[in-house]
Amino acid sequence: MSELQVLFSPEEIRATVERLAQEIQRDYQGKSPLLLGVLKGCFMFMADLVRNLNMPLEIEFVALSSYGRGRTKTSGKAELVQGLRTPIKGRDVLIIEDIVDSGLTLDFLLKHLRRKKPASLKVCALFDKAPRREVTVPIDYVGFTIPDVFVVGYGLDYDEKYRQLPGLYFLKETESSR
Ligand code: PRP
């Protein structure tokens, strides 16, 4: 069994997404960035973020997997399972992540993308689980910094469940669930 406890309500998330959109819009004035979402977790954040951006932009997605990953921990090995279908050389690329945990996924992606010579490369993450960081990664736009607890909702899953929930929830495990 597991219980969900609200960490951030849909209203709190909405306000933060609006704030991030304002920051992005201010910084990319006169530009047309490519927003690059990291599937699957980013889908809800991306959809809400772009609806708040009143500016020219394009959207692209990549999918990364970490093999050997446990259900609540990362293995530390990232692999690109769906790569870019748009050239990014000379583009202003903004990575859209739902959550940065160890930082290993983002570190891998940044290294991969830098080799393709974008004009600029920045990162927007809605949730920053800073206490879990294993490698230093730059995050230019942060929604919330969160403690080291297992969270679900707003795109984030536990065993592919709970992604559709509109808020962010702390998943409290009870003995019988494992
Ligand atoms: C999550 C999240 C990040 C990554 C962060 O994706 O979307 O991409 O983990 O973890 P890290 O900082 O420890 O590398 P996940 O691999 O769970 O896939 P999903 O988005 O498809 O659920």
Image: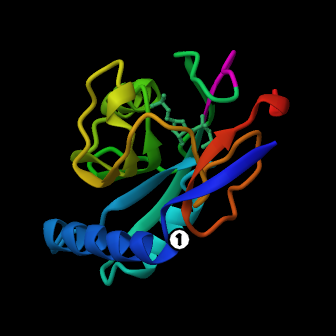
Q: Residue furthest front?
A: 175
Q: Would residue 94 be seen by someone viewing this image from the given angle? A: yes
Q: Position of residue 92 (x, y in %)?
A: 27, 54
Quadrant of the rendering where the N terminus is positioned:
top right
Q: Residue furthest bottom?
A: 54
Above or below, comparing residue 135 to residue 89 in the picture: above
Colouring of the image: rainbow
The magenta stretch is 64-70
Q: Tag 1's secondary structure?
A: helix
Neighbor class of circle 1 (other Cα within 10 Å; few <14, some 14-19, many 20+) is few
Q: Position of residue 95 (x, y in %)?
A: 38, 49
Q: Nearer the viewer, residue 172 or 28?
A: 172
Residue 57 position by quadrant: bottom left
Amino acid beneath label 1: Ala
Q: Position of residue 63 (x, y in %)?
A: 61, 40
Q: Would residue 85 be seen by someone viewing this image from the given angle? A: no
Q: Nearer the viewer, residue 12 or 49?
A: 12
> Which residue sits at x=21%, y=47%?
119
- Tell me if 113 is positioned left or right of 176 in this view: left
Quadrant of the rendering where the C terminus is positioned:
top right
- Tell me if 69 is positioned left or right of 46 in this view: right
- Tell me if 104 is positioned left or right of 142 in this view: right
> Which residue sits at x=45%, y=80%?
51
> Which residue sits at x=51%, y=56%?
60
Q: Does the magenta portion include 77?
A: no
Q: Nearer the viewer, residue 134 or 58?
A: 134
What residue is disc 1 on?
A: 47
